[in-house]
Amino acid sequence: MSAIASAFELVFQPYVLAVILCASIYGLILGCIPGLTATMATALLVPITFFMAPVPAVAAIVSASAMAIFSGDIPGALLRIPGTPASAAYTDEAYAMTKKGQAGIALGAGLVFSVLGGLFGTAVMITSAPLLAAFALQFSSFEFFWLAVMGLGGAVFIGSASVLKACVTLLFGLLVSCVGMDNPAAAVRFTFGVGELVGGVSLIPMVVGTFAVSEILRNVTAMDAPPRIGAEQVGNIFKGMWALTKRYKLAFLRGSAVGTIIGIQPGSGPDMASWITYSLSKRFSKEPEKFGTGHVEGIIESGAANNSSLAGAWIPALVFGIPGDTITAIAIGVLYLKGLNPGPTIFVTNAPAVYAIFIVFILANLLMVPLGWLIIKIARNVLRVSRNILMPIVLLFCIVGSFAINNSEFGIVLMLVFGVIAFVLEGNGFPVAPAILGMVLGNMLEENFVTSMIKSDGNPAVFFSRPIAGVLAFCTIMILFWPVASWLARKMRPAQGRGVPPV
Amino acid sequence: MDARNRACVRTAPSNMRLNDAILGSAFLGIALLVLWNVRTLPTIPGQDVGPAAFPGLLAALLIVCSVILIARGIVERGRQNWFEAGDWMRSLPHVRNFALVLGGLLFYILFAQTLGFFLCAILILVSLFLSLRVRATTAVPLAFAAALVVHSVFYKMLKVPLPWGLLPVLW
C-alpha cells in the first residue's frame, strides 16, 4: 500500500503535472499535423526527457504518445489525410462522415473511444503486469533468451510486408547494438578506431535520425500539393456519445481487447491494431454494407484499439524489458538511460515507479477529454501551419537534441547517418522499426545468450530443459517457422493439383 | 493483407528505388566486414563463447538473408530496374531541398564550433525556408525566433553547452 502512496507522491508534484500537461499539448499538436507521426513525436521528445528524473521522463513519453495517437484522427476527418499512420485505417470513413455533415460525431467518437480504449488497455496493464512479473521472477537466462528471440521473431514475422527485409533490418539493428564495449566480455568491438564509438552507438541520435530526419527528408521531397482545409462545421462533439457507447459496446470492447493484445505482441503497435480491428469490425458488423460510406462503427472499434494498444505495449516492456511497439522501444531506451532497468525485478525494487507509470496512464487518458476537445476546436488553425515552416524548425531541434546527449557533434553525425539509411531503406520497402527493436534488445539478448551458452557447457539441450524455457522455445520456433510452413503449404497445394492425372 | 497495403502506400512510385540485389550487396558487405573483424577480437581462455560469438552468429544470418535478397533481385531484374530515380529527383527544387537538409547537417557538424550555434542555426534555417518557398519576410524573423527559442530551452533551461563561436557569450 505504501508503494502506491509513494507513487501518488511521485506523480502529484507540480513539476510532473506540468510535464504531463506540456507533453500532452505537444503530442496533440504533433499528432494533428500530417507528416509528424506519434513515433517521431516520441523520438523528438527523448532528448528533453534525457534531462528529467525517471518518472517525469516516462510521463512525458506516455502522455505525448497517447495524445498523438488520438489527434491523428483529426486531419483524417477534416482533410482525409491521417495525422499518424495509426489513423490511416479509418481516415476515409471519417472523411465520408465529414462530407455528410457529421464531422462532430466522427471526431467525438474518435476522442471518446480513444479515451475509453486507452483506459481499457491501462486496466489490463495494471491487473496483469504485476502478476506476470511475479511469475517472471523465476525466469533464468534461458527464459529471457527465448523471450527476446520470440519478441524479435514476432516483430519480424507478424505483420511485415516482407519478412526477409524485416529480418535484414533486425539483424542490422542487432549488429549496431554490438558496437562498443557494452558486452559481457567488455571487449571493444567494431569501433574502427573511432573513439566516440567505444561507449556504443547512442540510442537517441539513432532514434532521432531514423524517425525524424528521415521523415524530414520524405517531407521536403514530397511531390503532393499541400492540403486544402474545408469549411465543414464541427458541432458539439460529445453529443450522442452515450447512445453510441450503448449501441456499439461490443465493438468497443472487441476493439480494445484486440488492440491490447496486438500491443502486447512485440513489434506491432497502434498502426497494426487499427487496421486489424477495422477489418474485424466490418466482418462482425450487422451492417457491413455501410462501411466506407461514413459509418461510425469502425471508427469506434479501431479508434479504441489504437489507444489501447499503447498501454498493452507497455506490459512486456515493463515486465520483460521487451518492447511491444516502436514507441515503447524508445521508452525502454530511456528507462535504461535513467537506470530504471525494466524487468520483473523492477516491480520489487522500484514498485513506486511502476505504479507511478500506471497513474500517469490514467491521468493522461483522462486529460485527453478536455485537451482533445480543445484541439478539435482549434484544429483548423493548427492545420494551417505549413509543413514548409515546420520541417526546418524540426531539423534544428533534431540537431540540438542529438548534440545534447554527449555534448558532442558526433551525435549529429550518427543522426545524419541513420537518417539517410532509414530514408533509403523505407523507400525500398524495408521496415525500420525492427532495427530499433534490435538495437534496444541487442545487449539483453547477447547477455542471456552468452550466459546460457556458458551454463549449457556445449549442450544445446539445456536451452529446452527447464519447463518454461521449453514452452517459450516451442512458441518461438512456431513463430519462426510459421511463414516457412505456410509458404510450403501454398507450394504443395498447386503441386498436388497438377499431380492429379486428368480423368 | 493490411500490412501489405500499408507497405504500398509507404513505397509510392515517387520514391527512389534500388534493386534488391544492390541493397542486398550492401548488407552482405556489412556482414563480411563484421566476420572479418571478429577474428581480431580477444578470446576468453577455456571458454568457447567469447565476444566474437554473438556478432559472428548475427553476421552469418545476415549473409544468408542478403544472399537470398541478391538472388531475388537478380531474378526479378526484368520487373525491378537496378536503379529507378524518384520523381522528386527530376525536380530541381526538391533535389535542392534534399541537398540542403543533408548539407545543413554537415555544415553544422563542421562549423558549429567555429561559427557558433546562432550563426549556423540561422543560416541553415533561412536557406531551407527560402528553398521551401517561405517568403523572405517570414523566413528571416522566423529563423531568428526559432534559434532563440531552441537556444533558450537547451542552453538556459537544460544547460547544454551550445557553442557561441564567433559571437561573444551574451548570457
Image (cartoon, rainbow, N blue to C red):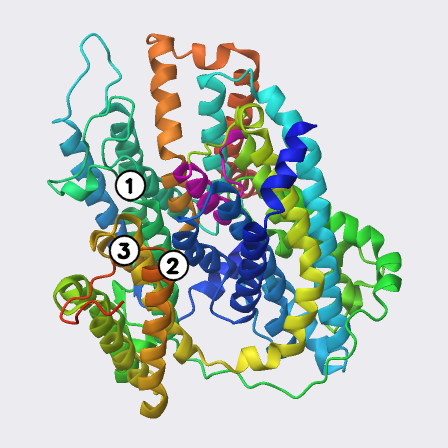
Report the residue marked by disc 2: B157
Pointer 3 indicates a residue of which chain? A
Q: Quadrant of the N terminus of chain A?
A: top right
Dominant secondary structure of the residues highlighted in magenta in the image: helix
Q: Are marks 2 and 3 in contact (CB under 8 Å)?
A: no
* Residue A299, horizontal then vertical, whole percent: 72, 63
Seen at 47% across and 83% down, the residue is A226
- Which of the pair A235/A279 is nearer the observer? A235
Whether A321 is among the magenta residues is: yes
Whether A234 is among the magenta residues is: no
Disc nearest the viewer among 2 and 1 = 2
Pointer 2 indicates a residue of which chain? B
On screen, residue B38 versus residue A78, left or right, reads left
Q: Are marks 1 and 3 in contact (CB under 8 Å)?
A: no
Seen at 65% across and 43% down, the residue is A359
Say which amino acid is labelled 2: Met
* Real-space Cα separation, disc 2 to disc 3, in angstroms: 15 Å
Pointer 1 indicates a residue of which chain? A
Q: Magenta segment, which residues?
A: A320-338
Q: Is residue B152 visible?
A: yes
Report the residue marked by disc 3: A403
User: Do the residues at pointers 1 and 3 share their chain?
Assistant: yes
A389 shown above or below A68:
below
Q: Are marks 2 and 1 in contact (CB under 8 Å)?
A: no
Seen at 72% across and 84% down, the residue is A233
> How many other residues sit within 10 Å of disc 2, few (<14), some (14-19) or many (≥20)?
few
Report the residue marked by disc 1: A176
Say which amino acid is labelled 3: Phe
Q: Secondary structure at mark 2?
A: helix
* Real-space Cα separation, disc 2 to disc 1, in angstroms: 32 Å
B32 shown above or below A47:
above
On screen, residue B120 versus residue B80, left or right, reads left
